[in-house]
C-alpha cells in the first residue's frame, strides 16, 4: 500500500503535469483527448502544483481566469492555440458558452495555505466568478443555483441527466443530446448563459461545490458580502436530503414513479458532494461500504444497486479521482479521520493501479478513458 508522500507517486505526478504544461500557463488534461484548458481541471492542477511547491499553480489559476468576462462568468473551456476548433459548435471562437463547478475558490485557498502568493486582482476575479453564479443566475423553484447544461456539472454523462437523453447511453448518443442542449441555451445581453429552453437543474453537487468554494475564499478573508448568500444556499441544500434513498436530490424532474423521469433521485457520488457543507455520517459511510459506493480503488460514481451501474462506461459507475479527492476532503473536514484516511488510500491505489487514468474500476483500479489524465495528480494531495 502506498503511503502519503510516497516519493515515487510524487515524481510520477510531477512528470504527468510537466508533460501536459502549455506555455500559455496551463495543463491540458490529456494531450490527445483533451488538448485545451478546462475550468475545474485547471483548479485541480493548481492544487497539485501547490502541493509540489511549484509556482505554476498560481500561473494556472491566472490563465484560467484570464478570459473571465465583465459579469464574472468563467467559460468551462478555453481553446488557446486552436481558437477556431469548436467555433461552429459554440457559435463563437476560443471559449465555450457554459461553465463548470467553480473550483477556483478552493484552488486559491490551497495555494495560499501552501505558501504561494495569490495577488489581489486574482482573488477579486475569484470573488466575481462566485458572485456571478450566486447573483446573476435566476434561481430554480427550490431556490438553488441552476446549471443549464449537463457539462456544467463536470459529470458529463451522469445518469442524473438521463431524463434529457432521447437515445441509448452510448457516448455517441450523449454527444447528440449535448449538442441539442447547447442549442437550447438562452444567452443574455452580456453573452453569458442565463437559461435554457430545455435543461434547468438545481444540481445538488454543483450547489455544494459553489457553497464550499465561497467558504474557501472566505477563509482568506475575501468575499465577505457573499456570506449571507452562501448560508442561505446551504440551508436550501440541506432540505434536499432524502433519508430514504440516502442521497441529496436535485431540483429537477422528480417523478418517483416512472423510469427515466427519476433522474434527480439516481444515487451518484457527485450527489453526495453536499457532504462538504453538511456532515451527515449516514451519507459518508456509504462511500466506504462495498454494498453501496465503496471499492478498493475509491467510491463508484454510481451506487452499485442502481440498474445502470456500469463501472467501465464513461460516467456510469467508474471511480473518478477528482470526486474521491473532494469526498475525502469532506470526510476530513467533517472530522471523520478514519473514512478520510481510507478514501485517501483508495485514491492512491486507484491512481497507481490505473497508471494515472481519467477514471477506473472502483473495485480493481483497472484504468478507463484518457491516460495519463492530469487530475490523477490529486493523489499526492490527500
Ligand atoms: C470530461 C469530464 C469533465 C472534464 C473534461 C476534461 O469531459 O467529464 O469533467 O472537465 O473531461 O478533463
Image (cartoon, rainbow, N blue to C red):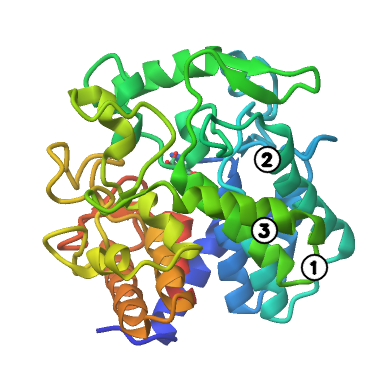
Is 36 positioned to the left or the right of 303 in the image?
right
On the image, the x and y values in percent for residue 291 come to 11, 61
Instruction: Classify residue 77 by image quadrant.
Output: top right
Percent x, y for residue 246? 26, 54
State the image coordinates of residue 5 (x, y, percent, origin top left): 44, 86
Q: Is residue 308 left or right of residue 158?
A: left
Q: Name above or below for residue 145 compared with residue 269.
A: above
- The disc at residue 118 is 1
Q: Nearer the viewer, mark 2 or mark 1?
A: 2
Quadrant the N terminus occupies: bottom left
| Nearer to the camera, 291 or 355 | 291
Residue 172 vs 128, above or below: the answer is above
Mark 1 and mark 3 residues within 8 Å of each other at the beta carbon: no
**For the point 61% across and 36% down, which residue is it?**
99
Res 214 label: 3
Q: Which numbered disc flags the more N-terminal residue, 3 or 2? A: 2
What secondary structure is found at the residue carrying circle 3?
A: helix
Residue in front for this viewpoint, 264 or 55:
264
Q: Earlier in the sequence, mark 1 or mark 3?
A: 1
Give how far apart the Cα atoms at labels 1 and 3 are.
16 Å
Residue labelled 1 has its Cβ within 8 Å of some atom of ligand 1:
no
Q: Answer with mark 2 or mark 1, whichever residue precedes in sequence.
A: 1
Q: CA distance from mark 2 to mark 1?
A: 22 Å
Q: Residue at x 44, y 75 (%)?
A: 334
**Displayed quadrant of residue 84:** top right
Query: How many marks overall?
Result: 3
Mark 2 — residue?
133
Q: Tell me the distance, in whole angstroms, between the alpha carbons under discs 3 and 2.
A: 11 Å
Is 327 rendered above or below residue 241?
A: below
The residue carrying pointer 2 sits among few (fewer than 14), some (14 to 19) or many (20 or more) residues within 10 Å by Cα, namely: many
Residue 104 x, y percent position in the rendering: 66, 56
Amino acid at each position: 500500500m502506498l503511503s502519503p508522500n510516497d516519493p515515487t507517486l510524487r515524481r510520477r505526478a510531477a512528470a504527468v503535469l510537466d508533460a501536459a504544461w502549455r506555455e500559455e500557463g496551463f495543463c491540458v488534461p490529456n494531450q490527445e483527448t483533451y488538448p485545451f484548458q478546462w475550468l475545474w481541471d485547471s483548479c485541480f492542477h493548481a492544487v497539485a502544483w501547490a502541493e509540489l511547491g511549484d509556482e505554476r499553480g498560481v500561473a494556472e489559476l491566472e490563465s484560467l481566469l484570464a478570459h473571465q468576462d465583465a459579469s464574472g462568468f468563467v467559460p468551462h473551456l478555453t481553446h488557446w492555440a486552436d481558437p477556431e476548433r469548436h467555433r461552429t459548435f459554440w457559435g463563437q471562437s476560443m471559449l465555450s458558452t457554459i461553465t463548470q463547478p467553480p473550483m477556483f475558490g478552493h484552488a486559491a485557498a490551497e495555494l495560499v495555505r501552501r505558501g504561494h502568493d495569490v495577488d489581489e486582482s486574482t482573488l477579486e476575479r475569484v470573488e466575481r466568478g462566485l458572485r456571478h453564479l450566486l447573483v446573476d443566475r435566476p434561481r430554480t423553484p427550490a431556490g438553488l443555483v441552476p446549471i443549464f447544461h449537463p457539462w456544467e456539472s463536470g459529470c458529463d454523462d451522469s445518469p442524473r441527466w438521463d431524463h434529457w437523453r432521447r437515445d441509448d447511453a452510448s457516448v455517441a448518443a450523449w454527444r447528440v443530446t449535448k449538442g441539442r442542449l447547447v442549442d437550447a441555451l438562452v444567452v443574455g445581453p452580456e453573452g453569458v448563459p442565463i437559461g435554457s429552453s430545455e435543461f434547468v437543474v438545481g444540481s445538488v453537487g454543483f450547489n455544494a461545490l459553489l457553497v464550499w468554494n465561497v467558504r474557501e475564499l472566505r477563509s482568506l478573508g475575501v468575499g465577505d458580502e457573499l456570506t449571507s448568500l452562501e448560508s442561505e444556499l446551504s440551508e436550501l441544500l440541506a432540505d434536499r436530503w432524502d433519508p430514504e434513498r440516502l442521497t441529496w436530490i436535485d431540483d429537477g424532474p422528480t417523478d418517483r414513479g416512472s423510469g427515466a423521469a427519476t433522474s434527480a433521485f439516481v444515487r451518484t457520488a457527485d450527489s453526495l458532494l453536499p457532504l462538504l457543507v453538511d456532515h451527515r455520517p449516514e451519507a459518508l459511510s456509504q462511500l466506504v461500504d462495498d454494498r453501496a459506493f465503496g471499492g478498493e480503488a475509491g467510491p463508484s460514481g454510481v451506487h452499485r444497486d442502481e440498474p445502470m451501474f456500469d463501472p467501465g462506461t464513461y460516467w456510469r459507475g467508474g471511480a473518478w479521482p477528482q470526486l474521491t479527492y473532494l469526498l475525502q476532503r469532506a470526510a476530513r473536514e467533517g472530522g471523520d479521520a478514519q473514512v478520510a484516511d481510507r478514501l485517501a488510500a483508495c485514491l492512491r491505489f486507484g491512481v497507481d493501479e490505473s497508471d494515472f487514468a481519467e477514471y477506473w474500476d472502483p473495485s480493481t483500479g483497472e484504468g478507463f478513458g484518457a491516460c495519463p489524465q492530469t487530475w490523477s495528480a490529486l493523489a499526492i494531495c490527500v
